[in-house]
Image (tube, rainbow, N blue to C red):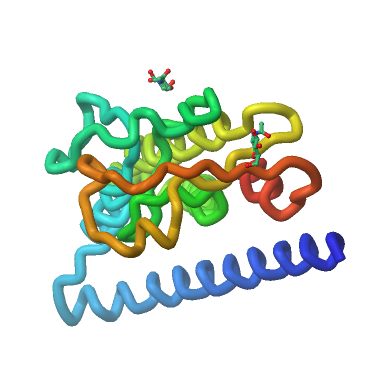
Amino acid sequence: MKKMDSHNQVTWILTFWCICSSSAKSMKYNHLELCSAGNIDYKDALSKGILFFEGQRSGKLPATQRVKWRGDSALSDGMLENVNLSGGYYDAGDNVKFGWPMSFSICLLSWAATEYSNDINSANQLPNLRTAIKWGANFLLRAHTSSTTLYTQVGEGNRDHECWERPEDMDTPRTLYNYTGNILRLWGDCALS
Ligand SMILES: *[C@@H]1O[C@H](CO)[C@@H](O)[C@H](O)[C@H]1NC(C)=O
Ligand SMILES: *[C@@H]1O[C@H](CO)[C@@H](O)[C@H](O)[C@H]1NC(C)=O
């Protein structure tokens, strides 16, 4: 069963990667067509895609933060169990930090940075991309609190979804979830990141 799971995960990642790279190829093709037809600015789109991650930041924000309407948030995440789980990224429009989608995202960002470094560099986005990767990877490292323990979620999904509030003001529970033991799929994503 475990084997099946990790096999499926690998298949899924590869499928996703194939879709991404083939759409990236067709984007290049379309880019030629669209550029001659109009004014699509892919460098701008790329920079905004990376800037998005700054808007999702949790924790103490650095002076270099470019998304200025965000402030420090969730500085005591992890304190309930004496671990430091501040930092990382919020998920979508939530104030929950989900380890799995976070590690998957960091993994894909890292993959893109490796595979397309020249293109990304030509848009002057490599330093921003690396910073985005580091912000997530540092959190994942801190969430790995012992050789057999990985914190995989901060915040309680149901309570969080019941109210819409800024992470800077949130008053919903910062419940901690950890996994101990054999969790191949999750470890795999984190290790890849
Ligand atoms: C948690 O770790 C971050 C990053 O290393 C650090 O800036 C912060 O001060 C730490 N928080 C606590 C409460 O120790
Ligand atoms: C992990 O979660 C369990 C169950 O919620 C909790 O008892 C334990 O203290 C947590 N931390 C570690 C390191 O296992």
Q: Is residue 115 left or right of residue 4?
A: left
Q: Is residue 84 above or below residue 14?
A: above
Q: Is residue 65 visible?
A: yes
Question: How far across and how far down the image is residue 8, in percent?
Answer: 75, 69
Question: How far across and how far down the image is residue 90, in percent?
Answer: 37, 49
**The C terminus: image quadrant:** top right
| Numbered marks: total | 0
Q: Nearer the viewer, residue 97 or 176?
A: 176
**In the picture, residue 17 is in which quadrant?**
bottom right
Question: How far across and how far down the image is residue 42, in percent?
Answer: 26, 63
Ligand 2 quadrant in view: top right
**The N terminus: image quadrant:** bottom right
Q: Is residue 32 above or below residue 10?
A: below
What's the residue at 49%, 51% (across, down)?
Answer: 98
Q: Is residue 112 visible?
A: no
Q: Nearer the viewer, residue 142 or 54?
A: 142
What's the residue at 49%, 34% (across, down)?
Answer: 139
